[in-house]
Image (cartoon, rainbow, N blue to C red):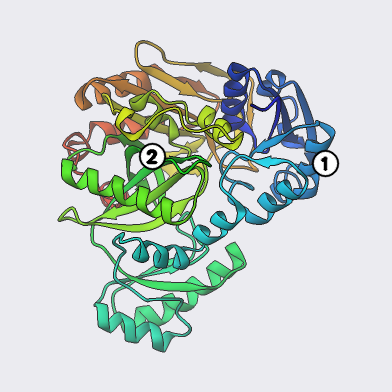
Amino acid sequence: MYKRILIANRGEIALRVIRACRELGIETVAIYSEADRGSAYLDLADEAYCVGPAKSALSYLKIDRVISAAEVGNVEAIHPGYGFLAENAHFNEICRSCKIDFIGPTPEAMQMLGDKNAARSMARDAGVPVVPGSEGLIEDEHQALKIAHEIGFPVLIKATAGGGGKGMRVAGNDLVLKTAFVQAQTEAKAAFGNAGVYLEKFIERPRHIEVQILADTHGNVVHLWERDCSTQRRHQKLIEESPAPSLPADRRKSMCEAAVRLIQSAGYTNAGTVEFILDQNNNFYFIEVNARIQVEHPVTEMVTGIDLIKSQIAVAAGEPLPFRQEDICSRGVAIECRINAENPDRRFQPCPGRIDKLFVPGGPGVRFDSHAHPGYVVPATYDSMIGKLIVHQPTRPAAIACMIRALDELRITGIETTASFHRRVLSHNEFVKGQVDTGFVERTWFA
């Protein structure tokens, strides 16, 4: 096992990794930007180094500064968390070339699965269903129109290097497709430096289901069941839960087994998430692999009892997984609400600023993962998430009731948060029935 690890991230996930390392007896080195200087969680690390100004491009994304901090801190490994450099294959390669382990998959697997078009091809070869669409990247609008007429409108244009809804457009006819094709390419080039796009059949009212996997360097691959991430706005997840409600047992089993097949075929190691969409007939289709830990990983931890961060570290250190597939049970129901510094009554306008008071909810089965505290100033520079409220109860009705109570109990003053909006969602009849699809929030509150 490692003696010293650097966390190449900030905020909630950095604190989460620090806590796991402390329990494993591993020393930690944290990094921070000028915007995060003085953050309370940094005091829990054994050392902390400033890597630049507030802008992430000049600090958390500055590979040479992160590596310098790792070398000065004399670490053996780097945990990238999520976001920033977590899925950057080049950073992964540099870590390894500097004799520093990257706590994640190999650069080769990361690069292969990070290209959504290549991942689709791999899924087909592994017998994993993919959404009907183009075999490769679309070169021009004429090719796009030809494929659209073959598979039928509406269609979805997607960036091969994309994420978070960027480089993604829906088209319902020829005219819209021509415009959307150019828009998607332009946005993809600006956001990812890669204008490549491909075409898929647009699935009406899909559910978004993802499967958590763990794979070690000894050939063992397991799934830790699924999470339903259908409650989202503009392709940004708001609420996640496990198990997925109203999902037939045979379909759940098939989806999880398909995820394992894909990961095995890719030679992937460490933690990852295989994402699927489910149509209204419960047919599932592969969409992408996230080659990192997910924001919503606590949901899986609550229902399986497995610490995913500790598992990541152990696998990177060369240890075999201590459990087999048949050992992994899913017990009860877990729900997570992302608490963002945003005003839901103003179309989720970011609300950076100083937190005056913070009262954290508690009680059986309640967990709050956050780096925030009274007096903490939420910077305008980064993602607006300030915490994750997670509950775990024996049944889904009990979990919903517990979450509503916990949201009522959570008190944050000085800034606006999304807590009140989550309460509205959890109380809605469609959510209670487990009938949410990815367009539910937009249709219900923003139509």
Disc 1 element: helix
Q: Which residue is drawn at the image coordinates 45% and 68% (left, top)?
A: 117
In the rendered view, does 132 fall on the left or right side of 320?
left
Vertical comparison of 209 with 286: above or below: above
Q: CA distance from mark 1 to mark 2?
A: 35 Å
- Displayed quadrant of residue 99: top right
The spot of residue 114 in percent (x, y) is: 52, 58
Residue 291 in picture, x, y percent from top left: 51, 49
Q: Is residue 5 above or below residue 131?
A: above
Residue at image x 45%, y 27%? 322
Q: Which mark is residue 247?
A: none
**For residue 142, side relative to residue 99 (left or right):** left
Question: Which residue is rendered at x = 42% and y = 26% of the image?
Answer: 306
The image quadrant where one finds the C terminus is bottom left
Q: Secondary structure at mark 2?
A: strand
Q: Which of the pair 34/63 is nearer the observer?
A: 63
Asked where in the image residue 203 lies, by quadrant, the reply is: bottom left
Q: Point out which mark residue 68 bears.
A: 1
How many residues crowd mark 2 within 10 Å: few (<14), some (14–19), many (20+)? many
Q: Of circles 1 and 2, which is in front?
A: 2
Q: How many numbered circles are shown? A: 2
Q: Earlier in the sequence, mark 1 or mark 2?
A: 1
> x and y percent of residue 202 in the render?
29, 67
| Mark carried by residue 222 | 2
Compare residues 401 and 266 and report the one nearer the observer.
266
- Say what amino acid the circle numbered 2 marks: Val
**Furthest-bottom residue in this view:** 142
Q: Is residue 143 left or right of residue 104?
A: left
Asked whether disc 1 touches disc 2, contact meaning CB atoms under 8 Å apart, the reply is no
| The N terminus - image quarter | top right
